[in-house]
Amino acid sequence: MTKNNWHDKQDRTEKNTFKPKWTPETIEWIIGQIIEMVDFIDIKYQLVKKHAISLSSAALWIEMARRINTDMLNGLSMAKALERDQERRNQMRKRLKKDSLE
């Protein structure tokens, strides 16, 4: 059995843990799976296996890919759709942080 050193190649945070890359290739793969109407549970488990993330993170990745796919169907490029999704997530974080401080 070969050792999987994928973790060793990942960027580290200040807590010395890795954060899987959310790449355009990953987005395209998820969108392709969604278009083919593959069962979401299968997509989640494949993401968990490929990227060593939790099932809940895999579900979030699928939701992000669905939003990006919708933006792309509405005429945005993948780069613009990624920017828009990042902006939406940042606004949500700010709103949640503001609500928690009140």
Image (spheres, rainbow, N blue to C red):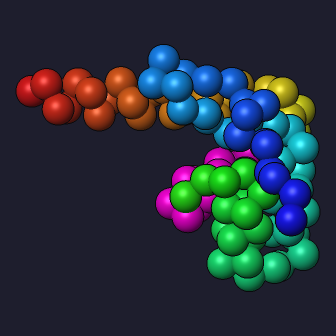
Residue pictured at 79% horizontal, 42% vertical: 6
Residue pictured at 78% horizontal, 57% vertical: 50
Residue pictured at 61% horizontal, 24% vertical: 12
As drawn, 12 above or below 44: above
As drawn, 94 above or below 32: above
Residue 39 image position (x, y, % from top left): 74, 82
The image quadrant of residue 20 is top right
Residue pictured at 23% horizontal, 24% vertical: 98
**Stretch of the chain drawn in magenta:** 55-68
Residue 65 image position (x, y, % from top left): 72, 51
The image quadrant of residue 22 is top right
Magenta stretch holds residue 11: no
Residue 10 image position (x, y, % from top left): 73, 31
Magenta stretch holds residue 62: yes
Quadrant that contains the N terminus:
bottom right
Along the line of sight, the residue nearer the viewer: 33 or 48: 48
Quadrant that contains the C terminus:
top left
Answer with left or right where residue 68 lies relative to residue 89: right
Along the line of sight, the residue nearer the viewer: 90 or 41: 41
Say if residue 71 shows up in the picture: no
The image quadrant of residue 86 is top right
Q: Main secondary structure of the magenta part?
A: helix
Q: Residue at the far top: name it.
A: 14
As drawn, 80 above or below 1: above
